[in-house]
Each structure stands twice: as C-alpha cells, then as structure tokens.
Image (cartoon, rainbow, N blue to C red):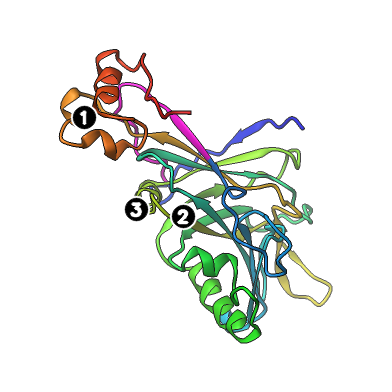
Amino acid sequence: MGRRAVVLCVCSAALGTAVATTATAATTQTFTTAQSPFPSLSGSGAVPNQGTCTSSAGPSQAACLPREPYDVYSARGSQDNFFTFDLRSSCVASAVTLRLVRGSQLYTGGTMGTSDYTFREVTTPAEIVNVPGGYPFSPQPFFEDSQRISQDLRDGPTYGGGPYPIDGSPQDVLSFPLNDAGVRGFNAARGGFFTVGGSGGGHFFVDPTGHLRRNPIFSSVTDPGTLVVTCALPANKDQCKNGGWQSYGVFKNQGDCVSFVATGGKNPPANSP
C-alpha cells in the first residue's frame, strides 16, 4: 500500500531535531519493531516489539499489553505506547527519526486543545517491557511489571515529538526527529535494545458523563514502528586510525574507512545498506 510521508517540524528547543551530521557523506540504516521480536505472552510466535500501557487511575492500576494497537490518549486514566528496536547491528547515529503510521483520531469535532505526541526515555529492560509477567506468564509479576513500565513511559528525559495532524489519510507515515538527548540515548543503547515510550492525545471533548477527555490518536494502528538512522561517519583519515573505524559500526576494517574518506564518500562503507 502506498504511503505519503508527512514530515513534522518540531520547532521548540525542548523537542529540537537531532544534531547535524559532520561526515563527508551520509549512509542510513533502518530498524523496525518487527526485528528480533520477543515471544508473545501466549507463545503464539513472532510479533512486533510494541504495544500500550493503560492506566485507569494512575500507574498502580496499570496493564501493559504488547502487540496491541498503539492508540494513545489521556482522560481520567491514560494509555501510552512503547516501541523497542534491536540495535545490535547499528552504526553510531548523528540523527534518528521515529516513523509511525498515522491512523486517525476517533473524534475530530472538538476545538479545545491540540493534538500532539511526545516520546521519552525508557530505562526498564526491553524483555520486561515486551513480556510483562515473564514467559511463561505469571499474573502477579505481570501487574508489578505493568506498574513499573507505566511509570517509566511518562517520566525521564523527552526524546522528541510534535503535533499530530488532524487532517490526512490513516495510511500517512508521520516522522518525528529525535532531539539531542534522544540521539545520545540511541547511541548509548547500541549493541542492545532501545525502547521509547509515547504519550499524548487528540482534541478534547466532553463524554456522555460530562467528563472532559482527550480522544485517542494512532487509532487501531498495528504497523511496525520504524527508526531511520543517519550514521555518523569520519571526516578525516585520522579518525579511522587506532581502532577508530570500529566505532562507526559500518566499516569492515581501517582500510575501508580510509578509502571512504579519501574518495569523499564515493566509496561507501562495506557494511552500509
């Protein structure tokens, strides 16, 4: 199915775009939540590393459900989402962009507030986030893990975000650049798993009970989340020496790195996509 890209400009300092690359040329890598999936709680096989945590009255009453549509909303309770990426083959990043399928807002008639999405650092180990309660499943650890994960999705440094467009096709792909903290978090996670947690919601509306609610965004979306990574690359030959070539994650040896620099990037890294 064709999808047109919708690039969201994040203008505030707090949600600024990632640092610019200083390389002589750029190469990219793409990671999705469908890569190296954790087992499902039911043991039904390979599924994406993403899902939601729903809380009816705070984290103490949370339930986290991997492999569910990643709807996000905020009302008397809330529902936040998470995405985990396998970075065991990643390069050092100079810029990272999170891409999610738009889905829709369930209610678009309200005029109060704005639709937005913010994602943050998640420090809970990926195997707990994606398999709360363990495997095989155990009920008591599930609720304890859910409380921990739900709190984690809403605290810690902000990694990026921005406005969620009200108008558009549900098949649009929205692009959210990670800010400087997000790029640092990505690079710190290289060699393992990287998880981000998101919160937000659509326009406010008054429900039939008279309560002000914020309607869901990303409604019913199950497509894998994606990270598009711009690799940091050397600007001079000295950066390739003394094992420096290994830090970039895309060269097969020092000579490959030196060749890349000497040709101004025309000879791409051997291990680039």
Residue 168 location in percent, x, y?
73, 38
Return the residue at label 1: 240
If you read the primary sequence from the N terminus, does the residue marked by circle 3 or circle 2 appear first? 3
Q: In this view of the protein, which residue sits in the foreground, 24 or 269?
A: 269
Q: Earlier in the sequence, mark 3 or mark 1?
A: 3
**In the image, what residue type sits under mark 3?**
Ala
Amino acid type assigned to the residue bearing label 2 in the image: Phe
- Examine the rendering and report whether any part of residue 20 can be seen: yes
Density class for disc 1 (Cα within 10 Å; few <14, some 14-19, many ≥20) is many
Magenta stretch: residue 21 in it?
Answer: yes
Q: Residues within 10 Å of mark 3 (few under 14, many from 20)?
A: few
Residue lying at 43% horizontally and 43% vertically, measured from the top left = 89
Q: Main secondary structure of the magenta part?
A: loop
Magenta region, residue range:
16-30
Q: Which mark is residue 257?
A: none
Lower position in the chain sequence, tag 1 or tag 2? 2
Q: CA distance from mark 3 to mark 1?
A: 21 Å
Q: Give the numbered dot on residue 188.
A: 3
Q: CA distance from mark 1 to mark 2?
A: 27 Å
> Residue 88, relative to residue 56: is it above or below?
above
Please tell me how crowded label 2 is: few (under 14), some (14-19), or many (20+) other residues with Cα within 10 Å.
Answer: many
Helix, strand or loop at mark 2: strand
**Residue at which label 2 appears:** 194
Q: Residue at x 50, y 50 (%)?
A: 86
Residue projecting furthest to the bottom? 140
> Which residue occupies the extreme right position in the image?
208
Secondary structure under tag 1 reads helix
Which image quadrant for residue 78?
bottom right
Above or below residue 98? Residue 199 is below
